[in-house]
Image: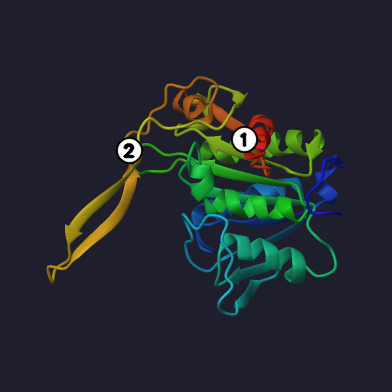
């Protein structure tokens, strides 16, 4: 199978026969990864787990190139890698899973949403992107939580299996991946599942200045100054209204409408 192309990938009608690779960016011991493995095990009996040894949030689509990577087997079909989520998927597909590649890659369930601008920073989404580059269908899953910092994983646990089955059975192009964001509410309060676009927050990422105990100055990258968005039909808007947001993401970042005027400009 080629890494990227224009044709569709064959639908996975029978996930029970599929090999599923599970990964994340929160690290091998993250509770969301345990939830995702339980979700994957409802879909297939052939589930493999390859995840970073430690948290890699914000790693984006980065590869480790300046040192060797160590792989540790933690149990049957369980491995950790001292690298990024992208490293994990590349090593899993190329080496760890042996002579049979995965039929589906699931990344998450991330602690916190991956909506709007998060898509470009997220290691969770990046793992799914790497799988897509390698020609494997992939889905990133993220669970938003409220200001109390207490995570209710119920929405992801209840809704993910059905959504994954529907996505796997449908048309799937080689340069496409899906990002699913679950709202911060109990499963029984979820207000449906919506197909939405990637949004854009009203605020920007804050940078906090301070001094350490020795008086030395530092800068610390913080959170968004404003998490809200006034854009309808987006992941941010859907999750804010307690709906599950499903967003198709495209690997080709080319802004097609600009090509013709750019060509004219450069002549």
Q: Is residue 191 above or below residue 262?
A: above
Quarter placement of the N terminus: bottom right
Q: CA distance from mark 1 to mark 2?
A: 49 Å
> Residue at horizontal 55%, vertical 32%?
198
Residue 5 image offset from top left, x and y in percent: 82, 46
Q: Is residue 215 left or right of residue 200?
A: left
- Residue that label 2 marks: 147
- Residue that label 1 marks: 265
Q: Residue furthest front?
A: 267
Say which element carries label 1: helix
- Observer able to see residue 37: no
Residue 219 image offset from top left, x and y in percent: 26, 58
Q: Earlier in the sequence, mark 1 or mark 2?
A: 2
- Comparing 266 with 19, the one in front is 266
- Comparing 203 with 80, the one in front is 203
Displayed quadrant of residue 171: top right
Indicate the colouring scheme.
rainbow
Residue 231 image offset from top left, x and y in percent: 47, 22
- Observer able to see residue 91: yes
Q: Nearer the viewer, mark 1 or mark 2?
A: 1
């Amino acid at each position: 199978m080629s890494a990227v192309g224009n044709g569709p990938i064959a639908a996975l009608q029978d996930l029970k026969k599929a090999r599923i690779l599970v990964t994340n960016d929160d690290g091998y011991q993250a509770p969301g990864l345990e939830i995702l493995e339980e979700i994957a095990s409802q879909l297939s009996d052939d589930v493999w787990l390859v995840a970073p040894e430690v948290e890699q949030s914000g790693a984006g689509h980065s590869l480790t190139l300046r040192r060797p990577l160590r792989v540790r087997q933690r149990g049957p079909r369980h491995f950790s890698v001292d690298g990024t989520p992208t490293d994990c998927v590349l090593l899993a597909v190329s080496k760890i899973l042996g002579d049979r590649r995965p039929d589906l890659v699931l990344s998450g369930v991330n602690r916190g949403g991956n909506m709007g601008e998060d898509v470009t920073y997220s290691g969770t989404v990046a793992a799914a992107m790497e799988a897509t580059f390698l020609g494997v269908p992939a889905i990133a899953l993220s669970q938003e939580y409220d200001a109390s910092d207490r995570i209710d994983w119920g929405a992801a646990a209840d809704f993910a299996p059905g959504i994954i089955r529907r996505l796997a059975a449908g048309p799937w192009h080689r340069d496409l991946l899906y990002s699913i964001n679950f709202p911060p509410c109990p499963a029984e309060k979820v207000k449906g599942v919506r197909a939405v676009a990637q949004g854009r927050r009203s605020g920007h990422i804050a940078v906090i200045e301070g001094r350490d105990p020795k008086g030395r100055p530092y800068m610390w990258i913080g959170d968004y100054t404003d998490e809200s968005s006034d854009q309808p039909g987006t992941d941010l808007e859907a999750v804010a209204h307690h709906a599950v947001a499903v967003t198709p993401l495209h690997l080709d970042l080319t802004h097609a409408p600009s090509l013709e005027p750019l060509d004219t400009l450069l002549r």
